[in-house]
Amino acid sequence: MKKQKRRSDRSGRAPLRSPGRPPSARREDCRRFWAAIATGQASEDAASLASVSPAVGTRWFREAGGMPPAKFASSAKPPSGRYLQFAEREEIALRRAQGLGVREIARQLGRAASTISRELRRNAATRSGGLEYRATTAQWHADRSARRPKPAKLVVNPVLRDYVQERLAGTVVAPDGVAIPGPAVTWKARRHGRRQDRRWAKAWSPEQIARRLRLDFPEDPTMRISHEAIYQALFIQGRGALRRELTACLRTGRTLRVPMARTRKRGKSFITPEIMISQRPTEVADRAVPGHWEGDLIIGLGGSAIGTLVERTTRFTMLLHLPPMPGHASGPRVKNGPALAGHGAEAVRDAIARTIATLPAQLRRSLTWDQGAEMAQHAHIRIDTGLCVYFCDPRSPWQRGTNENTNGLLRQYFPKGTDLAVHDADTLAAIALALNTRPRKTLGWKTPAEALDELLQSIDKGGREEAVATTA
């Protein structure tokens, strides 16, 4: 008995397993998602802009290793007009449902009739045995046919893979050759982004591995790989060469890449352009006018901290007492909970206002700080004290050079790794007095206290002279 052919046999394609819902309908959603990620948006916010659920956006970000696929990158070329796009396939499906012929559809779309005929045949939905045409399925078939998968170099070259993995995750050994497993160093969840628990390993960086290959195998061109290929093998799912848990051997321990725009934007919502150091008055730089201060925190064991304020002209130092709040260190640390260590935004605001209020108005002109979260209440500081608060650029401690130098002097009394919470306000006052009565070369061997006293006397004298002139 002759077997009757199905209409789907005309597609010239062997039966395929069902892919579930074809993903092609979300191509533009993906494009909008990665465009939002490039501007620094979080995965959930980018998903909302792309009209998909937050869970889908998080999955796209995770599967891509935190970096956009090449076809969605900002540097990617626009699709060639030679090939049918998804919007055109939707038009074909709509006109086909209206009963239009191949030549009429081609005339309306400005395409060749052979292109439409081939599209209807090759990319039709054949699951039911017919040749039904649906845009999403057609786009999925077109994408599947256009793929030119190239196996990763670490997959096809086991010698190279073993070399990379040994230098990345190899065990640490003593001089006598005995392996040292090392202690368990857990991730404390105190830095941005998800990170792996630390692993003791050789922990060469991908760039070190890539560069060393040229020295170890100068005559073997097959033993070459870029550091970017190693990173992709670690971060991108489906590369099949290196396991993702080996990211614990990287110095950062990141499980995903983080777009640069996101790191620049993160955690600095209270910083605006008008309060950056570039907008600070020029009189601050030459130190001729007193009353301009620099501030920072010195951090000790257990999250303890002391605030420091240094006047730029006289180098006069004032220390902020920041005692731990009730409940600190009495139980497990609550992530995103209140700042019980004593140097939260509210505690620092109150300490600055309380200390600066002891100075005359002429010595309360401006305060320069780094972009730490403890200054999130800077607007209230300005209202309470009259200080104009300015912020340094990221990773630019030299813009507060006077304060950084003073912090180095203070480490003589408050060494790193010690608990700063044991020092009360009287102790801090004594240490500040010791610094302010120490002669300074930059002041012509005067002490900061003497320099400040001269300034206060000149301010007081100038005020009396102005009052006399006004009376006369």
Image (tube, rainbow, N blue to C red):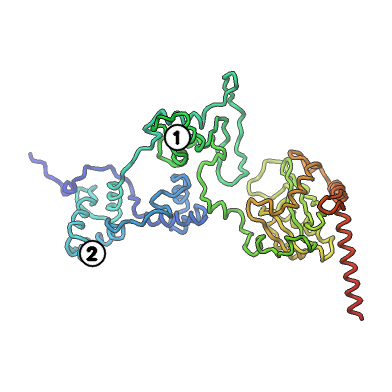
* Quadrant placement of the C terminus: bottom right
Secondary structure beneath label 1:
loop
Q: Name the kind of residue labelled 1 in the image.
A: Leu
In terms of depth relative to the viewer, which is nearer, 85 or 11?
Answer: 85
Total number of numbered labels?
2
Q: Which mark is residue 242?
A: 1
Q: Image quadrant of residue 162?
A: top left
In this rendering, does residue 326 appear at all?
no
Q: Which mark is residue 159?
A: none
- Residue at the top extreme, as displayed: 176
**Image location (x, y in percent) of residue 465:** 90, 73
Mark 1 touches mark 2? (CB < 8 Å): no
**Image location (x, y in percent) of residue 393:** 64, 55
Work out whether mark 1 precedes mark 2 in sequence or the reverse, and give the earlier one.
Answer: 2
Secondary structure beneath label 2:
loop
In terms of depth relative to the viewer, which is nearer, 360 or 106?
Answer: 360
**Image location (x, y in percent) of residue 60:** 44, 48
From mark 1 to mark 2, how far is it between C-alphas?
A: 47 Å
Q: Which mark is residue 110?
A: 2
In this rendering, does residue 463 appear at all?
yes
In terms of depth relative to the viewer, which is nearer, 63 or 4?
Answer: 63
In this rendering, the answer to whether 347 lies above or below 173 is below
Q: Is residue 419 left or right of residue 279?
A: right
